[in-house]
Image (cartoon, coloured by chain):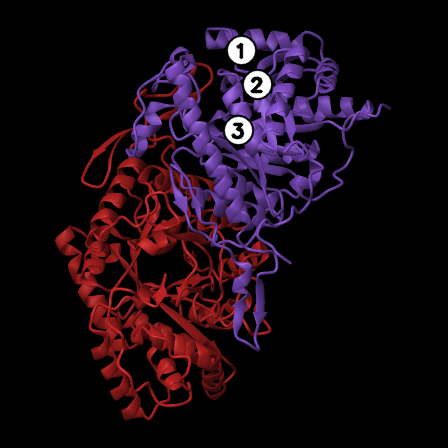
């Protein structure tokens, strides 16, 4: 008897503020107009994707004290766009990144519970943390959170939100006009949380939502991030670009679940990936190369290296060799507002490694940055990409992928039209939605079950 | 036809309606209050009636008949969805109606609210506003745990100490609105340039730090969300006395007030206009809307009967901060015209039973006003500011060119 084929989970990340988005492409549209989001969501739903995903930013990025202007700048509010998209879609899940540092559990819990009601059970929360004073300058509380406390706050934030979600059990509303009983119990929504990070009590004012709680996502590759996900999350985002690395991560994270009293099917592993799809593999390789050149201009490459060197490199030729000067160490970083620029090692050591890598492969600055910023990318014909994705999933390098097209809003269209039908033919991706809630799409049990 | 400017009409949406027993009346759909379909049906009805906008009530605590804490009642609607998200949910399914959710500014971050309302404006293509509300309910402070407020009865709120607390909360709200407005202007309209030749997506000279610093908070900016289609979405506020009138005068585009008579309306409008002038904004348009709880039926006496029946169900007469009207569309039209003559520019009607009285407005009152030439017969603008005759795209305070 053969093992049944694993079913693939697919999601789509709306392209925006990052250097993978090729805004100069003639097909690139607005990152703000709601019509762009509608187009993207309709494509994802037509392709029967599990969910679409929106990131979040709480301060415009800066470099050397100026607003960083080489990437897409600006984005709409995550909750508001997701709620509006709930009005023009019926099945696709709606996942938003919401920061646990610059929000309060009561308001975030009621926003997610509301989104879950308003979408009839399609809400998901990607819990992220932040601690920096730079972002904090936009908020009342400022940048108060010591870095080492961020997971402590995130964990308690999530636990508190769960207490709020669970403060309504689902059977409170009688709404019986004849007897005049609206609530069956006077204590609906009662909660009390007395902890290190939050000391709150009272009544939660959103009744239990269709999914009970939103689906919880967590990104992060660190030890703390993996452990947090194993304990709390329904899905984890990761970024591993080889079969072996994916399998190692998969084994590691799934192996942690038992310690938390959970089974491997209770946490999905969904790496982020991008793709270059063309009629033939050769054309796709050419397309992919062209995309990379557009993603990493000479200016972008220099700016990227400045994250390590922490000094102005604008005098260097991006097509030339790496800077021969040493990086400037120190607390103050040239680039602000990017999680990826926070190095926890000596930058001189990182620079040495980069120089060795460039010399070994004979790379210019720009080629080196193209090399080091490469991420999981599916390159090939529809047939090749379908086979690759399926192989990675069947061999337990992932449970599915979150695809980030490099063009918005139409970047998903060809994938939906060409790759998805091939996965469906192989019997590894749904032809129709079987359920209506995101939990059902992901094969996750309802928390009340 | 008179020279009177056209009347503006808004509807206030809350639960099953504004009468505590509304949910028990036929057609109230109390089991659907937490579904999108319920809200979509309401806003579609409001739009069919050509209303200027709908407001969505909200609070950061469970509804209670007591200011100072939960009342543990089980015979009234309890629980509500986030108003901004509800407004966003219905936005793509409407085309003209303005959408004005309530936001509690005492406990929320102005940066978050600014981008949420800017985004509501983007998703509705220029129909967003916000009603800012302060929180004087101690239970809401307990939900956040960041500050405290001693329990106060309504009477204690009127004492000098109570008034000084209220005054501080409204000052903070004024700062909050100032931050919203600065953030909406922090992107100039043409900041996004997509200049492939220089590799620049934005012209950073057209993005502005707002550098707001006040006693309660400081916000750096710029916004993360580009300037909304209306430039400045509508800011509205409900006011019952001098301190909140001042917020309306200083910060709002529309103030809702609760006069008990035409004479009362005249005095309130005069006080607000005086405050407006004192704030140096006398020449900037400001709408003052009268709030009314309404029961509307064509049949003479029917609305009063329904009110009596609802009061009987509730076990006590309906009490409201606003005047309660029960009568025919013609009588309501008479009252509105009368109060309009006292200086109000529009009304925010609070249907006693949404499932019944919203239609009383859209299908009874509106045609009656139209017959009198006092209300639009078609939408002539596409944005909320346009409906209200406000500058369709106000100048950006930071733009130099």
Q: Indicate the quadrant where residue A266 lies.
A: bottom left
Residue at 69% from the left image edge and 39% from the top image edge: B390
Q: Indicate the quadrant where residue A449 lies.
A: top left
Q: Provide residue A138's location: percent of width, then percent of height.
A: 40, 49
Mark in the foreground, 3 or 1: 3
Q: Secondary structure at mark 3?
A: helix
Q: Crowdedness of circle 2 by 10 Å Cα count: few (<14), some, many (20+)?
A: many
Circles 1 and 2: CB distance less than 8 Å? yes
Q: Which mark is residue B310?
A: 1
Q: Residue furthest left?
A: A259
The vertical placement of B268 against A189, above or below, is above
Q: Indicate the quadrant where residue A256 lies.
A: bottom left
Residue at 83% from the left image edge and 25% from the top image edge: B3
Q: Earlier in the sequence, mark 1 or mark 2?
A: 1
Residue at 32% from the left image edge and 24% from the top image edge: B149
Q: Secondary structure at mark 2?
A: loop
Q: Secondary structure at mark 1?
A: helix
Q: Nearer the viewer, residue B295 or A386?
A: B295
Q: Provide residue B110's location: percent of width, then percent of height.
A: 44, 42
Residue A399 visible = no
Chain letter belonging to callout 1? B
Q: CA distance from mark 1 to mark 2?
A: 9 Å
Quarter of the image with the C terminus of chain B in it: bottom right
| Residue underneath mark 2 | B352
Q: Earlier in the sequence, mark 3 or mark 1?
A: 3
The vertical placement of B248 against B241, above or below, is below
| Chain that appears purple | B
Q: Provide residue B207's location: percent of width, then percent of height.
A: 52, 58
Task: Tell me: A71 left or right of B190.
Answer: left
The vertical placement of B252 against B139, above or below, is below
| Chain that appears red | A
| Residue underneath mark 3 | B247
């Amino acid at each position: 008897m053969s093992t049944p084929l694993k079913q693939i989970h697919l999601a789509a990340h709306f392209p925006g503020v990052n250097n993978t988005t090729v805004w100069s492409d003639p097909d690139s549209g607005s990152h703000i107009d709601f019509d762009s989001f509608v187009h993207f969501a309709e494509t994802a739903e037509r392709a029967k994707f599990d969910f679409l995903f929106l990131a979040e930013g709480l301060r415009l990025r800066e470099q050397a004290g100026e607003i960083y202007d080489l990437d897409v700048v600006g984005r709409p509010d995550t909750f508001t766009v997701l709620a509006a998209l709930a009005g023009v879609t019926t099945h696709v899940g709606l996942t938003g990144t919401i920061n646990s540092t610059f929000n309060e559990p009561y308001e975030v819990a009621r926003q997610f519970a509301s989104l879950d009601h308003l979408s009839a059970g399609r809400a998901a929360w990607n819990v992220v943390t932040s601690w920096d004073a730079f972002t904090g300058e936009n908020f009342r509380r400022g940048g108060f959170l010591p870095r080492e406390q961020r997971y402590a706050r995130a964990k308690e934030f999530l636990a508190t939100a769960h207490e709020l979600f669970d403060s309504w059990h689902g059977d409170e509303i009688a709404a019986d006009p004849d007897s005049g009983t609206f609530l069956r119990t006077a204590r609906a929504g009662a909660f009390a949380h007395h902890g290190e990070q939050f000391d709150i009590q009272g009544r939660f004012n959103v009744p239990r939502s269709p999914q009970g709680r939103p689906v919880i996502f967590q990104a992060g590759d660190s030890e703390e991030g993996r452990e947090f996900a194993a304990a709390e999350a329904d899905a984890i985002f990761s970024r591993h670009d080889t079969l072996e690395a994916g399998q190692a991560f998969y084994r590691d994270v799934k192996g942690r679940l038992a310690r938390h009293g959970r089974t491997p099917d209770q946490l999905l592993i969904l790496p982020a990936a991008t793709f270059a799809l063309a009629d033939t593999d050769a054309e796709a390789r050419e397309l992919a190369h062209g995309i990379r050149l557009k993603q990493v201009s000479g200016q972008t490459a220099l700016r990227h290296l400045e994250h390590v060197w922490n000094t102005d490199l604008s005098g260097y030729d991006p097509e030339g060799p790496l800077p021969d000067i040493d990086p400037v160490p120190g607390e103050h970083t040239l680039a602000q507002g990017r999680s990826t620029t926070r190095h926890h090692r000596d930058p001189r050591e990182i620079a040495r490694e980069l120089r060795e890598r460039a010399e070994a492969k004979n790379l210019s600055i720009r080629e080196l940055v193209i090399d080091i910023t490469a991420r999981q990318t599916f390159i090939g014909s529809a047939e090749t990409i379908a086979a690759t994705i399926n192989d990675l999933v069947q061999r337990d390098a992932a449970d599915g992928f979150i695809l980030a097209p490099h063009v918005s809003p139409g970047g998903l269209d060809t994938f939906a039209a060409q790759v998805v039908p091939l996965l469906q033919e192989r019997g590894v991706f749904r032809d129709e939605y079987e359920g209506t809630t995101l939990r059902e799409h992901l094969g996750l049990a309802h928390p009340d079950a | 036809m008179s020279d009177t400017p056209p009347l503006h009409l808004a509807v206030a949406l809350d639960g099953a309606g504004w009468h505590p027993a509304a949910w028990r009346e036929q057609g109230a759909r109390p089991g659907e209050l937490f579904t999108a379909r319920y809200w979509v049906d309401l806003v579609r009805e409001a739009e069919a009636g050509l209303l200027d906008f709908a407001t969505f009530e909200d609070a950061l605590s469970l509804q209670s008949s007591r200011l100072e804490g939960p009342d543990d009642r089980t015979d009234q609607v309890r629980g509500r969805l986030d108003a901004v998200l509800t407004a966003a949910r219905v936005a793509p399914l409407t085309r003209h109606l303005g959408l004005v959710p309530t936001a509690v500014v005492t406990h929320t971050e102005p940066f978050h609210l600014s981008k949420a309302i800017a985004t509501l404006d983007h998703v509705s293509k220029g129909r967003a506003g916000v009603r800012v509300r302060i929180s004087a309910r101690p239970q809401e402070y307990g939900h956040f745990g960041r500050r405290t407020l001693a329990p106060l009865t309504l009477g204690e709120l009127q004492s000098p100490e109570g008034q000084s607390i209220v005054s501080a909360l409204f000052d903070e709200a004024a700062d909050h609105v100032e931050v919203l407005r600065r953030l909406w202007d922090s992107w100039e309209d043409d900041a996004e340039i997509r200049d492939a030749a220089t590799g620049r997506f934005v012209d950073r000279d057209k993005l502005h730090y707002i550098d707001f610093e006040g006693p309660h908070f400081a916000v750096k900016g710029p916004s993360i969300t580009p300037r909304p289609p209306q430039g400045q979405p509508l800011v509205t506020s409900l006011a019952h006395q001098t301190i909140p009138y001042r917020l309306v005068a200083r910060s709002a585009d529309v103030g809702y007030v609760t006069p008990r008579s035409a004479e009362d309306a005249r005095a309130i409008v005069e006080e607000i206009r005086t405050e407006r002038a004192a704030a140096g904004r006398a020449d900037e348009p400001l709408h003052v809307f009268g709030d009314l709880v309404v029961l509307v039926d064509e049949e003479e006496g029917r609305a009063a009967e329904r009110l009596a029946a609802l009061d009987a169900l509730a076990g006590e007469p309906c009490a409201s901060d606003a005047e309660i009207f029960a009568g025919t569309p013609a009588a309501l039209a008479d009252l509105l015209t009368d109060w309009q003559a006292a200086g109000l520019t529009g009304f925010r009607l609070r249907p006693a039973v949404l499932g019944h009285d919203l239609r009383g407005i859209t299908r009874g009152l509106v045609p009656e006003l139209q017959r009198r030439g006092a209300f639009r017969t078609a939408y002539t603008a596409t944005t909320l500011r346009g409906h209200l005759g406000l500058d369709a795209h106000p100048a950006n305070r930071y733009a130099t060119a």
